[in-house]
Amino acid sequence: MQLLDYIPFLVEGVPWTLALVFSGLTMGFSLGLPLSLIEAFGSRGAKLVVDAYVWFLRGTPLLVLLSLLYWGIFPSLGIKVSPFIASIVALGLRSSAYQSQIFRSALLSIESGQLLAARAMGMRDSQVVMHVLVPQALRIALPSWSNEYAIMLKDSSICFTLGVMEILTRAKYISTATGSALFPFLIAGLLYLALTRAGVEAIELLHRKVRIPGTLGGE
Amino acid sequence: MLRIEGLRKSYNGMEVLKGVHLELREGETKVLMGPSGAGKSTLLKCVNLLVRPDEGRIFIDGEEVTSPKVDVVRVRQKVGFVFQEFNLFNHLTVLRNVTIGLTKVKGMSKEEALRRAREVLEAVRIGEELWGRYPAQLSGGQKQRVAIARALAMDPVLMLYDEPTSALDPQLSKEVLEVMKELSRKGVTSLVVTHELDFAMEVANSLAVMSCGLIVEEGPPSEVIRNPRSSEARRLFCRV
């Protein structure tokens, strides 16, 4: 087989990589947003718990977290998960810690007067969060969130250690099969570059569409 | 309409309100004046229950709103609040700023809310060409008039204004004051913290002077301004 014949096999890793990234980002978002609300407006005790969670996940290398979950925590709890699911959980947990910080900064940048005005008109706290805080925080956080996408995309390559059939795992197979490292890893690198660029551009496009007119960066 | 009895409030051991008594009848406009730190803003926030008083009672429309059994959210819907810094929702257009309370808090249908928003925006002289703009695209005077419309839309029994023109230049202040005067003349019950003597003289039924957490003088605006009896009021009006 020629080296070029392996390209389709390598490209087939793209959906796997994207599945890891989007699932990880979704899980990170679902956990990170509530955590950011606790960090910004929660009680002292709740903030301490979230701080400890964020401190642990931001301070632990992803590879360690992945191994800990797949080889340690899941088996000890008697839960059998596939390498793909374990990877998503690791990526998602780690991302939730980072996303919580992105959204926390965005929430705190909203003038407190708006909260006061919302309460003054009779909104309940849940309504203030849903109709005033979150819609603005998401818009403000979008540029920083595109970094999270780029980081997650590159970090997803670590999942090759569990044999998830994403881009890097496939590049490694080709390298072993052909004895050539340059070509498969070069193509893998180019695929990551293209995916990063496309994703960041898409988020930038979304940002331009939803940003608040008249404010910084708006029209 | 509004009766305040012996209201006290402290922050970190510092007493900001020291037993305030105040009464406002339906359709009246009362102006509250006093130096910075007198407790005027805290008093307004207590009336709207944005701040919980430590002691004392507040009655709105005969209902004791300081009672622990009272639903705070329901009381706030009855009392419109206009802030010095406008506090419009930046992500919403002028129209949505006015309708959001109607749809989300009052549970009105979109059509009903739009009809009500139309009425109040016209009342504060915000033309249709501005309805699709965002707060950052408005002048200070326009923002404050939208904020008044937003409060007014909820059909409050009482309007509270906390220095609504302090952040505006004289020309923009004039626009806002004109709207407030018109509302007062229409009989919207209002408690207004302001330093605008003309406003007090023209439309207020009474003027109260606050100093160090107490109301030290109260009466018809022309009398209090021209012949202040208390030393605090004399100091205030000499400076103004």
Image (cartoon, coloured by chain):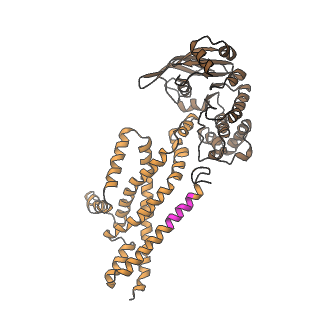
Chain colours: A orange, B brown
Position of residue B80 in the picture relative to residue A48 (left or right): right
Q: Is residue A199 magenta?
A: yes
In this view of the protein, can residue B222 be seen by the observer? Answer: yes
* x then y, percent, for residue A219: 62, 54
Viewer-closest of B152 and B37: B37
Viewer-closest of A39 and A26: A39
Q: Which image quadrant for residue A132?
A: top right
Count every numbered label the image shows and give the total: 0
- Quadrant where the C terminus of chain B lies? top right
Q: Which residue does the image show at 38% across and 60% down from the upper left?
A: A91
Q: Is residue B54 above or below residue B50?
A: above
Q: Is residue B146 above or below residue B11?
A: below
Q: Is residue B169 above or below residue B205?
A: below
Q: Which image quadrant for residue B185?
A: top right
* x then y, percent, for residue A138: 51, 52
Residue closest to the far bottom: A1
Viewer-closest of B111 and B117: B117
Position of residue A185 in the picture relative to residue B196 (left or right): left
Viewer-closest of B116 and B202: B202
Q: Is residue B226 magenta?
A: no
Magenta stretch secondary structure, dominant: helix
* x then y, percent, for residue B141: 67, 38
In this view of the protein, can residue B61 be seen by the observer? Answer: no
Residue closest to the far top: B229
Q: Which residue does the image show at 61% across and 28% down from the upper left?
A: B160
Residue closest to the far front: B239
* x then y, percent, for residue A93: 37, 56
Q: Read off the magenta span.
A: A198-207
- Quadrant where the N terminus of chain B lies? top right
